[in-house]
Amino acid sequence: MTLDYLDFDYSEDCEGTGTFDAMAAANPAQLPALQAEVAQVLAWAHAQFPGTQGPADEGGEWDDDLSAVQEVATPLALAFDSTSSTIAVHTGTPAPARTTITLTISGGSAFCGALREAFGMD
């Protein structure tokens, strides 16, 4: 399975738990595809490791943390007035909202190996 939006960074703790972190930002037109990709990864995890989601210290094989933020960028035009030595600020037209989704998914070595294989991660 190919991932177009999510680019995971991998780290591992001293107990062997691997963690994949990804953050992706999308404009309104791209958001459905980004959400579908996140859903694909989580659906895979639930299907391949059913009933094993949960924190490792509570016996879980894998777990995830999913969050998002939506930001509207509003450009500001700045102009220096040399007479008064001040800066004048004029608010521009806000851009369409951009959504950033963060997905952290972690697990034991079997889970991490299977996730790498399923999504072609290095």
Image (tube, rainbow, N blue to C red):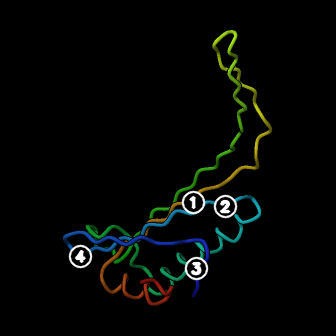
Q: In which quarter of the view is residue 73 placed?
A: top right
Q: Which residue is mark 3?
A: 3
Q: Which residue is mark 2?
A: 26
The amino acid on which the numbered mark 1 sits, given as a three-letter code, is: Ile
Residue 116 x/y as whole percent: 43, 85
Residue 82 x/y as whole percent: 68, 15
Residue 85 x/y as whole percent: 63, 13
Instruction: Looking at the image, tell me whether mark 4 or mark 3 is earlier in sequence order.
Output: 3
Residue 2 x/y as whole percent: 58, 85
Mark 2–mark 1 contact, CB under 8 Å? yes
Q: Residue at x 48, y 80 (%)?
A: 45
Q: Which residue is mark 4?
A: 16
Give how far apart the Cα atoms at labels 2 and 3 are.
Answer: 14 Å
- In the displayed structure, 13 sits above or below 101; it is below
**Mark 1, secondary structure of its residue:** strand
Instruction: Looking at the image, tell me whether mark 1 or mark 3 is earlier in sequence order.
Output: 3
Residue 104 as seen in the image, left or right of residue 40: left
Q: Nearer the viewer, mark 1 or mark 3?
A: 3
Give how far apart the Cα atoms at labels 4 and 2 are.
Answer: 33 Å
Instruction: Looking at the image, tell me whether mark 2 or mark 1 is earlier in sequence order.
Output: 2
Q: Which mark is residue 101?
A: 1
Instruction: Looking at the image, tell me whether mark 4 or mark 1 is earlier in sequence order.
Output: 4
Q: Nearer the viewer, mark 2 or mark 1?
A: 2
Give how far apart the Cα atoms at labels 4 and 1 are.
Answer: 26 Å
The amino acid on which the numbered mark 3 sits, given as a three-letter code, is: Leu
